[in-house]
Image (tube, grey):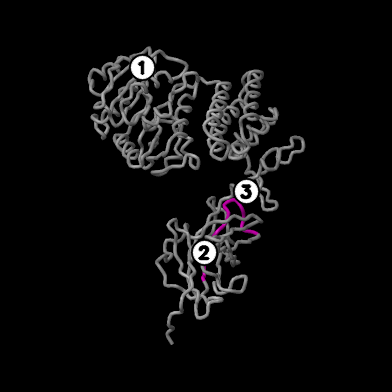
Amino acid sequence: MNTTAVRPTDVKDVTVAVRVSNQAAALDACLASVLVQSIGTDRLEVIGVDDGSTDESGSVLARAAHQYPSFVRVGQVSHGLSPAGARNWALSQVRGRYVIFLEATDRLAPDALERMVAAADANEADVVLGKLESSGRHPVATSMFRKNQAYTDVYATRVYWSLTPDKLFRTSLLQRRGLAFPTDMLIGDDQAFTAGAFIGADNVSVVGDATCVVKGPSPAARATLPDRVALASRMLTLIASQLPEGPRRDKLQSRHLEVELGKATAAALLSATDAAERDQALWAAAEVLRTQASPGALALLPRMVAVRFALLAQGRFPEAQQMASFEADKDRPAVRKTVENGRVFTTLPFFRDPQVGLPDELFDITGDMTVTQQLQKARWEGPMLMLDGFAFYEQLSTKERTTRVVLRERTSGAQESYAVTARRDEALANAKGKPRAMGRFSARVNLAQTSAGWPLPPGTWDLYLAVGFEGVTQEVRLGPKRSGDLDTTARMPVPIGAAPGARGMELAAVPFYTESGGFSIEVSQRTPLPRHT
């Protein structure tokens, strides 16, 4: 191994750690993609690790080190339980400010490192995710790469759903947190490492507008159901040790419940493997659900998975098997919804089944209702603000409309609401093409007369739409979603009436749009301007 002492002048911008295990045929392409990086070889180093290969992988690495001795170093380790040992050796050799871990089947886009390092430096990011792309039919996570993100909230986005170590990690973060790949895990050592980095990072950025890493196929999976149950339990424990109880812990734990435990138990329930062995693993999964899964994390899961988990936790394996079969049936009819007392329930199997007794809350999908809305017109007739647009639920009809415009004062919380008039529009439809004909609205917001009989008092009033259909109401901000031809230029103050209790003064309203696009009105008191006769 090349273990020369590191001098300050040897510090590079980025270290690329490449692990190879009997993948000599792919290794040349991986190394070539690193050597042509637009960042320049003077700013990077390559550490290649042969993880106990029995093919020509070691020879390929040795040839690269001989050809490029100034920035390619190689080593060899005995293959352990997982790739952790090879990755940790590479980590011990890092001389870059940042490090990224690749497999021999991966390739970098030509400008990947330049873009990722630039994002890390500009945004002071401890972790940078570069957009992933599959090199074949094997899937890769993509939901977190829809756009560039300078500052990302790990607890409010899909970033945490990508736990492979093909990220750019700030080396000082790894040293400060004492992070390494756990060597006692059969699978998932990369998840534990990347999760620790995400939790410890001050900022995480995303380079999402162009592919950075082309992912090759992973080695053939050898993990059994007990292995996957153990991984889920390990990750739940890790998160609980790093974060206090609450929404942030729930968010991260829900990922492992859904992805590891959810997929593994579904496959087991539908497989024809030995029933006794399967049930033993399912009992272990049930124990994880009973002892480690918080109600908050379970509430974040897709309802089908949550119902299956509730059945597993009760030891109802035959019913859980029915639920797994229902989930897997792509030809099943659409699941009906039931609306009661302002709540929406999905009538999945075992909904209000007296033999099983699952709680209604398990089937409650009210929070999943999504509003499609747009403000299309806003004009003044004296003190009257005339609004036009549309708003409807994607999942509900436009029957029993109770939609209202709401004005809420930003500081005091005082509010006024105004009824809307529905206008039929046969062309209005949801994303699936189903008609929402009564979703169009018009509203007359009279600022000269509130519910108390006085003009709207001074303050900053934000406009909302309380969208109500079929007894379900959800409030959305008016303005961020608006027609492209809506006039958003600054307006002269609109007189709305005499100021109560202030002789000789009047109230005037100035409409404006906030930085995030919300429509608001500033009401202030002033001396009346001269009127033209």
In the rendered structure, which disc, 1 or 2, sits on the residue that comes first in sequence? 1
Q: Distance between the residues labelled 2 and 3?
A: 28 Å
Residue found farthest to the right: 354
Q: Which mark is residue 366?
A: 3
Name the residue nearer the viewer: 158 or 156: 156
- Give left or right: position of 472 versus 391: right
Q: Assign the magenta stretch its main secondary structure.
A: strand
Q: Residues within 10 Å of mark 2 (few under 14, many from 20)?
A: many
Quadrant where the image shows the N terminus: top left
Q: Which mark is residue 50?
A: 1
**Residue 495 image offset from top left, x and y in percent:** 48, 76
Name the residue nearer the viewer: 300 or 3: 3
In the rendered structure, which disc, 2 or 3, sits on the residue that comes first in sequence? 3
Name the residue nearer the viewer: 166 or 265: 166
**Residue 340 image offset from top left, x and y in percent:** 70, 51
Q: Distance between the residues labelled 1 and 2?
A: 64 Å
**What secondary structure is found at the residue carrying circle 1?**
strand
Q: What residue type is labelled 1?
A: Asp
Quadrant where the image shows the C terminus: bottom left
**What secondary structure is found at the residue carrying circle 2?**
strand
Q: Which residue is drawn at 47% across and 39% down?
A: 154
Above or below for 286 versus 399:
above
- Residue 73, located in which quarter of the rendered image? top left
**Is there a contact, CB below 8 Å, between mark 2 and mark 3?**
no
Please tell me whether residue 276 belongs to the stretch shown in magenta.
Answer: no
Q: Give the range drawn in magenta.
A: 385-399
Above or below for 189 versus 426:
above
User: Which residue has dot 2 on it?
Assistant: 461
Q: How crowded is mark 3: few (under 14 residues within 10 Å), some or many (20 or more)?
A: some
In the rendered structure, which disc, 1 or 3, sits on the residue that comes first in sequence? 1
